[in-house]
Image (cartoon, rainbow, N blue to C red):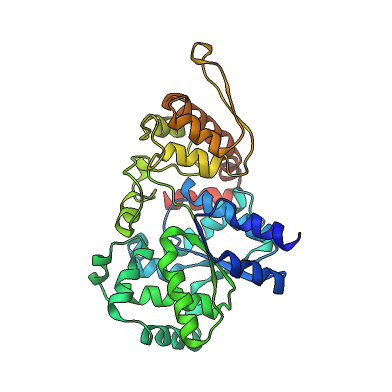
Amino acid sequence: MDVTSKVELIVRNTEEVITVDDLKQLLESNPSPRGYIGVEPSGLFHIGWIIWVNKLKDLMNAEVDMTFLEATWHAWINDKFGGNISLINTCAEYIEHCLRALGVEVSKLKFVKAEELVDEKEYWEGVLKIAKSLSLSRVKRAVTIMGRKEEESIMDFSKLIYPCMQVEDIFFLDLDICLGGMDQRKAHVLAREVAERYGYKKPIAIHTPLLSGLQGGGRMDSDDKIVECKMSKSKPETCIFIHDSPEVIKEKISRAYCPPKEIDGNPVIDIARWIILYDGREAIINRPMKYGGDLTIESTSELLSLYSKGELHPLDLKNFVAEELIKMLAPVREYFETKKEAKLLLQQLK
């Protein structure tokens, strides 16, 4: 695959790349750069995470040497599972199974637990060096990467260590590329600024869109709105888990916020756009003949145009999204039904 093809594959369906020029220069000089995504083992895997899973696959297909950081200590600091590190590690194992079920070639993915990093003296030297380069107010503004509002940084002092750890993760693992949702932007921008200050390698940041919760809530145009509106496993009634039954998926989609003609802040449109039509494939939306019959959608832009003009009814969109999700997640349900270890882990976390 040539450099242009790699750039196109990596950049497609992203919200932001900082920067595309840097990415192109990197791939021209290094055909197999090092990348990563860090994920807190914090609960059941919902469909919003499929967005970064798809981008992880794109990066791997573009010959990026990807590391998956199981951010167990980060989850502990963030009070996930009530700070129970045993459950956090159980969740990390479960997430590995989720990735397999979703078709990620885990044999080509390097898994690293946060415990491996924090055991090293050099890691903590890096964390303190980063902390010395940042003001208290700057660190407090960055706690939104934890899915918390800025004022929550006063809950306990460890919350202020978290952003410095996330930045050091990048340098300690000697990474060229960082993958994350838009909620991770502040950490990646901090890493680029710290890199300039200390003469470190400046990482390229790739940010994927965030899926809003099924309750809607408007555009996620600020950090507080991101925390409030993005799909969250802590609100199970507003999210779809990858192993939900067909009946549950249909029920949740039927109750989802989906106002006619509105694109922004519409979670059903977002699911269609960022998950179902990710590969740009043609799709058929079934409709009764009295309402015009079946619709063939050839692109995401066509879907958005039809819906915004009122030429596609919310109910028809919901039925399409529900059926496509059920088909897409069928291999995941089968995996967790037939793999004994995966099934047991899921039962423990439920």
Q: Residue at x 48, y 75 (%)?
A: 192
The image shows residue 131 at horizontal and vertical percentages of 37, 83
Q: Is residue 85 visible?
A: no
Picture quarter containing residue 23?
Answer: bottom right
Q: Residue at x 38, y 73 (%)?
A: 162
Q: Is residue 223 visible?
A: yes
The image shows residue 125 at horizontal and vertical percentages of 45, 88
From the viewer's side, name the closer residue of 97 and 216: 216
Classify 272 as above or below 9: above
Q: Residue at x 26, y 73 (%)?
A: 156
Picture quarter containing residue 264?
Answer: top left
From the viewer's side, name the closer residue of 217 and 105: 217
Classify 54 as above or below 109: above
From the viewer's side, name the closer residue of 21 and 237: 21
- Number of numbered tags placed on the structure image: 0
The answer to whether residue 164 is left or right of residue 23 is: left
Quadrant where the N terminus sits is bottom right
The answer to whether residue 216 is left or right of residue 108 is: left
The image shows residue 179 at horizontal and vertical percentages of 53, 63
The image shows residue 149 at horizontal and vertical percentages of 28, 62
